[in-house]
């Protein structure tokens, strides 16, 4: 029964500090649907607030690169969903982020940490009985007997391991080699898709994070080529100034999503054969028609007016080169000079003579990719939940049980809001980090904590180093950063299982039991001291779970704009001729590779789907396979072929 109580007056978090934004960004904010709020009008009082009151801090300096912010979002959405970006021409960013911004597969998702040799049950189909990965005889009592300790990770399947040789010039997959120096996971002599060693976080609301990735390696400073911010001191761009092509230093703040976008496209597990470079990817992608092998809904909220009504992808005139020219200022793409892989002009050469010589646009492709993908992801803000309506004054929208869960969430005993506070429900947001003065000497001030999910020896988290060998938190001590991970936002958490950076819990009830017993692995200082003070009552799990489900935005649940998307064929494990005997992919080049089981994620337009997304628990139990849920991972799909029926 709905409660008639008014909005709770409990303190949730300090509100956000004002962030400077150039007046030239007003158009950008309007296009992205961000509220344009003068700094003097930003709220500063504490309390329960809707996410609608929070402005996404815009990236500083973006106006120096972009001339059409509307087309920029079109470009970013196309790049994010386009499987042509993968070395196999079948893997997009969205392949691991298609379901409420996260992954929703259960076969061939298991991995172990890189430094720990363990037998991984390859191509396994996960079941509800596999969870949680760390199981006590009494799930609410850490002192009880440990029944299971798999020490595995439910990650995301990426690409088969191969060495990059060169791009193809006809739109086919990259050329790769299979040297012995790259031992690949295989079953019965057939290579299979690798799995990532951390669970996939949702990209929805990630624009509020100061740093992205579980370990925070995606810096808020975008430098145009890598995720690592100021560690990357190279001149990563080329700019045409007075007719002369000159090296250009890329520096944008509040741009962690642009930094994050630099990682997966070249990662040898996620999307790329080992050794591919950004200029090579630019040379491959720029001539291609955007989303040329995928269906796009005619009423897609971003892509619809560009969609090809006669076939797949966008209209033939919408190549990536054309979209880049429309979105970005000419000084970053119009030079006729030819450069080498380091950006040095090759004198006397009028056009590239080989795949090792590049145009300015090809060399600058990572700049275009990062800025565009960030602009698209900044539209993925889920601020219309029942909780938001409650916070806006509708006291009847939450039930008594949900209100009890909210009050418990905010209580000093449960301490949930210490790591998941504010309208964003994460201490890793600009709201919280600004309130702590951007204190880089303390990872917890950036929303990174140690809660005993996995042994520090298995995954050091933010205590690691970046691609230049520099600590991810250089101002912090190694001890304070080791084993800490970013507190994820909790919005839409009902739909984003499995949970934690290990993916070791399948249900919110299992997560509640984890907190009730105060973590799994405490040895070696693996818990922040405050975590040992968490006190949950006997009914806390039920109440907290009920409250967390009020944080689901129905636009996400039903894939309505801005969460609509193109069609995607997703690989979900490898078919077997008999138990443990995989079927080969007869069309794959190189060493024998296992065939894939492909399932369809249909294209949806702005009106979304008629049925809600399936939860991970429902996936494991088969609930919704009768058509009452979306993304049940059973509809067949052939990559590159139009799916049956027009997209909704």
Image (cartoon, helix red, strand yellow):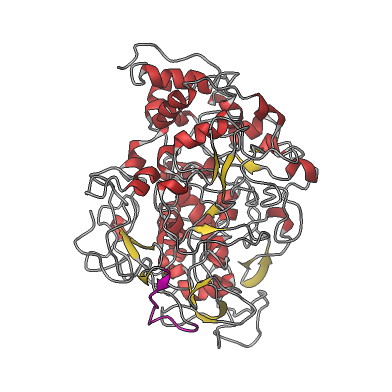
Is residue 452 visible from the viewing direction of this image?
yes
Q: Nearer the viewer, residue 511 or 460?
A: 511
Q: Tell me what residue is drawn at x 48 percent, y 41 percent.
A: 205
Magenta run includes residue 350: no
Magenta run includes residue 589: yes
Q: Nearer the viewer, residue 228 or 249?
A: 228
Give the residues in magenta.
Answer: 580-591
Q: Is residue 159 left or right of residue 402?
A: right
Is residue 19 visible from the viewing direction of this image?
no
- Which residue occupies the extreme top position in the image? 5
Residue 46, above or below 524: above
Residue 607 image point, x, y percent = 26, 45
Residue 164 image point, x, y percent = 56, 78
Q: Nearer the viewer, residue 514 or 587?
A: 514
Residue 334, above or below 404: below
Q: Tell me what residue is drawn at x 60 percent, y 47 percent.
A: 214
Residue 448 image point, x, y percent = 65, 39
- Which residue occupies the extreme left position in the image? 645
- By secondary structure, the bulk of the magenta-drawn segment is best described as loop
Q: Nearer the viewer, residue 601 or 190?
A: 190
**Number of numbered discs:** 0
Residue 351 image point, x, y percent = 54, 84
């Amino acid at each position: 029964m709905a409660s008639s109580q008014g909005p709770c007056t409990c303190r949730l978090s300090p509100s956000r500090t004002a962030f400077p934004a150039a007046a030239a960004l007003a158009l950008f904010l309007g296009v992205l649907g961000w509220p344009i709020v003068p700094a003097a009008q930003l709220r500063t009082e504490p309390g329960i607030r809707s996410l609608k009151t929070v402005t996404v801090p815009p990236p500083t300096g973006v106006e120096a690169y972009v001339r059409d912010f509307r087309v920029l979002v079109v470009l970013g959405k196309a790049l994010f969903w386009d499987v042509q970006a993968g070395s196999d021409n079948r893997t997009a960013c969205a392949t691991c982020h298609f379901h409420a911004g996260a992954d929703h597969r259960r076969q061939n998702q298991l991995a172990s940490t890189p430094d720990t040799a363990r037998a991984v049950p390859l191509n396994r189909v996960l079941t509800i009985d596999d969870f949680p990965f760390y199981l006590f005889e009494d799930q609410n009592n850490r002192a009880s007997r440990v029944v299971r300790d798999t020490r595995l990770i439910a990650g995301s399947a990426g690409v088969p391991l191969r060495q990059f040789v060169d791009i193809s010039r006809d739109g086919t997959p990259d050329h790769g080699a299979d040297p012995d120096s790259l031992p690949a996971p295989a079953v019965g002599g057939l290579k299979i898709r690798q799995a990532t060693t951390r669970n996939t976080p949702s990209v929805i609301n990630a624009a509020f994070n100061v740093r992205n990735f579980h370990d925070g390696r995606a810096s808020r400073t975008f430098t145009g080529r890598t995720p690592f911010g100021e560690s990357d001191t190279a001149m990563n761009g080329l700019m045409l100034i007075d007719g002369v092509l000159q090296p250009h230093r890329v520096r944008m703040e509040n741009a962690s999503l642009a930094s994050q976008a630099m990682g997966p496209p070249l990662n040898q597990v996620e999307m790329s054969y080992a050794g591919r470079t950004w200029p090579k990817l630019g040379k491959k992608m720029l001539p291609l028609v955007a989303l040329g092998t995928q269906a796009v809904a005619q009423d897609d909220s971003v892509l619809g007016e560009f969609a090809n009504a006669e076939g797949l992808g966008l209209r033939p005139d919408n190549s990536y080169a054309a979209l880049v020219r429309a979105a970005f200022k000419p000084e970053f793409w119009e030079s006729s000079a030819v450069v080498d892989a380091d950006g040095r002009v090759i004198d006397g050469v009028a056009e590239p003579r080989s795949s090792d010589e590049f145009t300015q646009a090809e060399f600058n492709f990572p700049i275009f990719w990062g800025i565009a993908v960030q602009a698209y992801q900044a539209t993925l803000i889920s601020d219309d939940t029942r909780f938001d309506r409650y916070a806006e004054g509708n006291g009847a929208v939450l039930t008594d049980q949900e209100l009890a869960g909210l009050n418990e969430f905010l209580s000093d005993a449960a301490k949930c809001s210490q790591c998941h506070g504010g309208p964003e429900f994460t201490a890793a947001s600009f709201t919280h980090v600004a309130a702590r003065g951007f204190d880089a000497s303390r990872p917890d001030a950036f929303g990174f904590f140690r809660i005993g999910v996995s042994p520090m020896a298995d995954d050091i988290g933010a205590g690691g180093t970046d691609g230049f060998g520099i600590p991810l938190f250089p101002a912090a001590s190694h001890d304070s950063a080791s084993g800490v991970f970013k507190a994820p936002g909790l919005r839409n958490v009902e739909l984003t299982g499995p949970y934690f950076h290990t993916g070791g819990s399948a249900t919110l009830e299992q997560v509640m039991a984890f907190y009730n017993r105060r973590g799994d692995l405490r040895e070696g200082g693996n818990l922040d001291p405050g975590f040992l003070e968490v006190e949950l009552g006997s009914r806390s799990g039920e109440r907290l779970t009920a409250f967390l489900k009020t944080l689901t935005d129905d636009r996400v649940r039903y894939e309505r704009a801005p969460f609509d998307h193109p069609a995607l064929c997703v690989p979900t494990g490898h078919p077997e001729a008999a138990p443990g005997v995989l079927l080969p992919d007869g069309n794959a080049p190189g060493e024998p590779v296992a065939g894939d089981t492909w399932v369809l994620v249909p294209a949806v337009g702005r009106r979304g789907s008629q049925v809600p997304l399936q939860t991970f628990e429902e996936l494991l139990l088969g609930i919704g396979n009768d058509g009452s849920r979306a993304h049940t991972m059973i509809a067949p799909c052939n990559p590159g072929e139009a799916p049956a029926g027009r997209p909704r």
